[in-house]
Amino acid sequence: MNLSEKIALVTGGSRGIGRAICLALAGEGATVVASARGMEQLESLADEAGKMELAGRIIPKKLDVTDRAAVEETVESIASEHGKLDILVHNAGITRDGLLMNMEDEQFDEVILSNLKSAFWLTRAASRHMVRARHGRIIYISSISGVHGNAGQSNYAASKAGLIGFAKSVAKEYAKRNITCNVIAPGFIETDMTAVLPDAVKDGVKPLIPMRRFGKPEEIAGVAAFLAGPQASYVTGSVIMVDGGLGM
């Protein structure tokens, strides 16, 4: 198990990509603090882990990443209880889609706060412990929209593009401390977020994807587990597209 004795914090861990990442990291031996706003789905995740013989490796933690005090308290409590924090995966995010000319300030601000500014708070708090340990793995879940843009998602694309620039800066700042920082940019993945898309939209997108299908959360989780592990010790500042070739 590549991540044996490692402690991880995953935001947005209750469903979709975040849920799959929690299970993947736990499957590699890590103790995973799975956080989200709602506890019911987190407790369901912990039960699922138990059925997979991963009992005790997933710890549910209620967290609103838009609450700076809660973010800092969560990181400090993990470090205090476990003595360290090895891995941070920031997956939590929201959408408030709309055409730019009709977009309200609140729609823009909410997305930037939840998707981007929260990454600053989380990384600032976690990196203090990683610097002392001279080891850390930081992973942000961005989006193909953050690389190529997307009509009707100027706020979302800006937040996800911001994560990429932020990650490259973090990677340069902490590389000499043996702390890596990388980004995964998923394409269309089978999650609650894509499930609400009209069939006409899905049918229009799939022919544009060379692999002719949407990805699965587990296909993102596998990349996250790689980046969190020792095999990726010389990978930092990278943006890994997991999109079935859509971005080519």
Image (cartoon, helix red, strand yellow):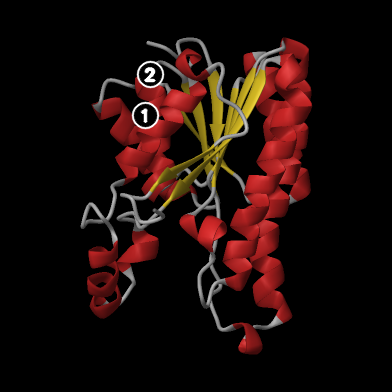
Query: Callout 1: helix, strand or loop?
Result: helix
- Between the C-alphas of marks 2 and 1, the distance is 6 Å
Task: Give x and y (percent) for residue 83.
Answer: 67, 13
Would residue 73 be seen by someone viewing this image from the given angle? Answer: no
Most extreme residue toward the front is: 248
Nearest to the observer: residue 66 or residue 184: 184
- Residue 225 figure quarter: top left
Q: Which residue is mark 1?
A: 24
Nearest to the observer: residue 156 or residue 168: 168
Q: Residue at x 52, y 78 (%)?
A: 152
Q: Amino acid at mark 2?
A: Glu
Most extreme residue toward the bottom is: 102
Q: Are marks 2 and 1 in contact (CB under 8 Å)?
A: yes
Q: Residue at x 50, y 70 (%)?
A: 150
Decide: is 156 above or below 184. Answer: below
For label 2, the crowd category at 10 Å Cα-Cα, with few meaning under 14, some 14 to 19 and many 20 or more, is some
> Horizontally, is 158 left or right of 244 in the view?
right
For residue 241, the mark is: none
Quadrant of the snapshot with the N terminus: top left
> Horizontally, is 13 left or right of 63 in the view?
left
Count up the numbered dots. Answer: 2
For label 1, the crowd category at 10 Å Cα-Cα, with few meaning under 14, some 14 to 19 and many 20 or more, is many
> Horizontally, is 134 left or right of 184 in the view?
right
Q: Residue at x 64, y 48 (%)?
A: 163
Q: Amino acid at mark 1?
A: Ala
Decide: is 240 above or below 98. Answer: above
- Residue 214 figure quarter: bottom left
Nearest to the observer: residue 247 or residue 198: 247
Task: Give x and y (percent) for residue 123.
Answer: 71, 36
Decide: is 160 above or below 10. Answer: below
For residue 28, the mark is: 2
Task: Give x and y (percent) for residue 125.
Answer: 76, 33
